[in-house]
Image (cartoon, grey):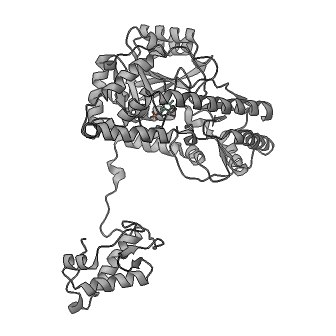
Amino acid sequence: MKIPLDRSADRNGRLPLARQIQLHFERLISQRLLAPGVKLPATRELALELGVNRTTVAQAYEDLVAGGWARAHVGQGTFVADAAPTAPPAAPTAPRLEWTGFLSKAAQIVAADARRREAWSQSARPGPGIISFAGGVPDSALFPTDAFRRVLNRVIREEGRELLQYYPSSGYPPLRQYLSSYLLRFGLEARPEDILIVNGTQQGFDLVARTLLDPGDFVAIEQPSYPRAMQVFRAFGAQLLPVPMAGGGLSVDHLERLLERQAPKLLYCQPSAHNPTGLTMPAAARRRLLDVAARHRLPIVEDGFDGTLFYGERPPAPLKAADASGQVIYLGTFSKILFPGLRLGWIVASQELIERLDMAKQLADIHTSPLIQAAVYHFCRQRLLDRHQARVLREYARRRGALLAALGRRMPDGVRWTETQGGFSLLVELPEGMETAALLPRAVERGVAFTPGNAFFADGGGERALRLSFSAVPFSQIEEGVRRLADSVRELGRHPERSARVRGPAVPLV
Ligand SMILES: Cc1ncc(COP(=O)(O)O)c(C=O)c1O
């Protein structure tokens, strides 16, 4: 261990060597560079390395123990104490580089977005006792963790050597092959070479943006929409052109009018299981959208992130299934139907574009983990995903039903919400004159949380909207959560002037 000892110590009347060693460890421990439980180097080895007497090191360790920084175990050594003091980082000794002056345009846009998101991220994971409809995530209590662990163990045992090596960026061939067959279930015909494996839809947005967008380009986007997609397009310097929704999907009439005036580089939409509304674009509107897009040579980024998560009628086939001109880029993910932590998704596009996206991917991260791809492939091949999906779909359908019923029973007049048909959430609209920003602190006080709708509106609107996600709320808490929310709405109606700010840890918005 490198410890900068001042060997002139004794002669110059500076600190003795033992004290210097002690202070060095105190600094490392207080700043958590050495975590509780970590073993300190053996006295003999450290003494040798530092060229000091062993008793000097032993003295330093004794003082550390006496000061509560470490604990000694006879015959085992000295360890960092569990409750060792922590300290704020030491004041810098040299002037520090100010990074803000170096930030790229993209980083500045991301930072501005992060500030804008402050309100909703504060609400997303509030404290104990709060029923949170905020996170649009799958319920980890339903995860098939043991089954996946068994598959992963086998994959490491049998294919570990190849899978832990660098790997082709396009993905694990059996998984691409599997996806080709899987997508047929939705009417989508994609050859393995039309598929690129990526680190979740989020990387799909990024690769599409860096391949197709230049600063100043316009991107048409359904409104409301998924904030993380908007952030990526904005970060690449694009300006968003919101297209309102009508009849379940984006208004094709509105898009047509927009295309007469402007020429967006692409359109982003979620025709099924739309986040945040849960609505589905009807088949006829999908056909019209494809027509209009073909006429205007407008590429479409279709986020089909959980086409399997629907309640009631099966949604129409994805746009990509009827994409004769090859202008739809379809993004899929295992995040909602399996585990978001795997960061595994895919892009389907014409081979020419897939090759470009692949080049961008190689620059970004060389490839997605082949180990994870192989594990997911075997998980799917053993039909474990199908079984899991059927099970969670039943549970999510139950929660959705409970949420809709509770809203119907408890919400005051004037509150409206979308009849979610797929995905994890629905969008509520408060009556005229009420704002979600004022509702959230009251709701959190009463023990319920949600995501303010403003985050989903590209034009900064949505002040009266809020998203409720039912996927991760236990069935037994839904009625009570809605009761608390409805009471908060009533209270806001009675005292619109009283408001407070909520504080909580920030979590990613999904
Ligand atoms: C609309 C939409 N697209 C995609 C995703 C999934 O993203 P990823 O695959 O990066 O986890 C989400 C997650 O919430 C989403 O809401």
Judge from the rendering whether residue 175 lies leftward or rightward of residue 272; answer left or right.
left
Q: Residue 257: percent from the left, percent from the top?
A: 52, 13
Judge from the rendering whether residue 289 lies leftward or rightward of residue 30; answer left or right.
right
Q: Quadrant of the N terminus?
A: bottom left
Asked if residue 504 shows in the view, the reply is yes
Q: Residue 128: percent from the left, percent from the top?
A: 64, 53
Q: Residue at x 64, y 31 (%)?
A: 427
Judge from the rendering whether residue 401 lies leftward or rightward of residue 181; answer left or right.
right
Q: Residue 201: percent from the left, percent from the top?
A: 43, 31
Q: Residue at x 37, y 37 (%)?
A: 372
Asked if residue 237 shows in the view, the reply is no
Closer to the camera, 287 or 493?
Answer: 287
Q: Residue at x 79, y 44 (%)?
A: 491
| Placement of 24 over or under 56, stated as above or below | above
Q: Residue 396: percent from the left, percent from the top?
A: 62, 32
Closer to the camera, 430 or 404?
Answer: 404
Closer to the camera, 79 or 493?
Answer: 79
| Placement of 473 over or under 391, stated as above or below | below
Locate residue 133: give its quadrant: top right
